[in-house]
Amino acid sequence: MQNSRNFMKADFTKLQGIKTDQMLDLPQPPLEKPAAENAEIIDLIPVENIKIKKNNLQENIFNRRSHRIFTKEALTLEELSFLLWASQGVKEVITRDDKAYATLRTVPSAGARHPFETYLVVHNVETLKPGLYRYLAIGHKLVFLKEIEDQPKKMTDAALGQEFAGKCAVVFIWAMIAYRAEWRYHLVAHKAALLDAGHVCQNLYLACEGIGAGTCAIAAYDQEKTDDLIGVDDIDEFSIYMAPVGKPGN
Ligand SMILES: Cc1cc2nc3c(=O)[nH]c(=O)nc-3n(C[C@H](O)[C@H](O)[C@H](O)COP(=O)(O)O)c2cc1C
């Protein structure tokens, strides 16, 4: 128990005396996991072309709550584009020594490391076939990864039997690419990344309000089943958080 408590504490003094890989001038990992060659890439709607139905920040903050019952209504590609932009959208790529060094996004991240990839289990989004996708945040595109057999059941099982994960329009699953943060922050990367994840999901909640959708954060999921579902190795990349999204039915 004490180890878990200690993990929550500010531990930046641990870095004293440690040479991070950044300090050692080791090559920086990519800011985004690249798409495979010949992958199916889908353009998303640029945020400046998206009309937000409910744009009152005060009301959206007040009305935000967790939704676990959804209608069968599909999300449009425009709505999905907005949610992806709001939760992980890239506003600027910063270069250092002519190399891409950091992204500045719609959410904050310790040291601007942004160590996440956003996977989507799409059940019901207009113009997208059901299956697994990943957000290519820098270009604001999607890459189609695979079809998933028996998808609603597999998604529900991955969410530890929480049925709304199989009965929504789309599930956002955030995976951590650990070295993207460790390169700069070594042992203290992990606590900061969990704090980062909270900002990502909060923006998703608020953005959902803006388009008349709803979501619910999920931390109680099956690590192995989820990592298997999204096709990550559970060592260098692993899921840390998920959030089903749909049009609220309650
Ligand atoms: C980190 C985190 C993990 C959560 N995990 C779950 C979950 O696994 N299942 C669930 O139904 N709700 C989950 N929730 C939603 C909370 O139960 C919900 O936020 C809380 O009951 C307050 O309700 P509200 O969001 O409507 O204000 C989670 C929320 C957070 C912030």
Image: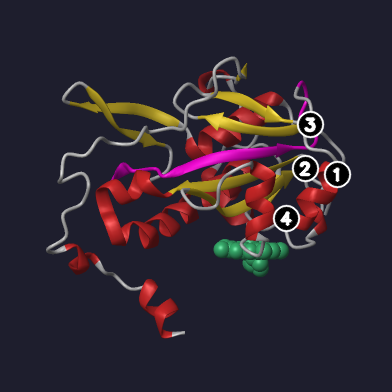
Q: Secondary structure at mark 2?
A: loop
Q: Position of residue 19 (x, y in %)?
A: 16, 54
Q: Is mark 4 within 8 Å of ligand 1?
A: no
What crowding class fits label 1: few (fewer than 14 Cα within 10 Å), some (14-19), or many (20 or more)?
Answer: few
Which mark, residue 71? Answer: 1
Q: Amino acid at mark 1?
A: Thr
The answer for how far apart the CA atoms under marks 1 and 2 are is 6 Å
What crowding class fits label 4: few (fewer than 14 Cα within 10 Å), some (14-19), or many (20 or more)?
Answer: many
Residue at image point 25% right, 35% down: 27
Which mark, residue 247? Answer: 2
Q: Amino acid at mark 3?
A: Pro
Q: Nearer the viewer, mark 2 or mark 4?
A: 4
Q: Position of residue 198 (x, y in %)?
A: 49, 56
Q: Is mark 1 within 8 Å of ligand 1?
A: no
The answer to whether residue 218 is seen in the rendering is no
Q: Position of residue 85 (x, y in %)?
A: 52, 32
Q: Which residue is mark 4?
A: 158
N-terminal of the pair, mark 3 or mark 2, is 3
N-terminal of the pair, mark 3 or mark 1, is 1
Q: Is residue 112 magenta?
A: yes
Q: Nearer the viewer, mark 3 or mark 2?
A: 3
The answer for how far apart the CA atoms under marks 1 and 4 are is 21 Å
Segment tinted magenta in the rendering = 111-127
Q: Is residue 50 left or right of residue 34?
A: right
Q: Nearer the viewer, residue 210 or 183?
A: 183
N-terminal of the pair, mark 1 or mark 4, is 1
- Quarter of the image holding residue 191? bottom left
What crowding class fits label 3: few (fewer than 14 Cα within 10 Å), some (14-19), or many (20 or more)?
Answer: many
The answer to whether residue 60 is seen in the rendering is yes
Q: Are marks 1 and 4 in contact (CB under 8 Å)?
A: no
Q: Which residue is mark 3?
A: 130
Q: Is mark 3 within 8 Å of ligand 1?
A: no
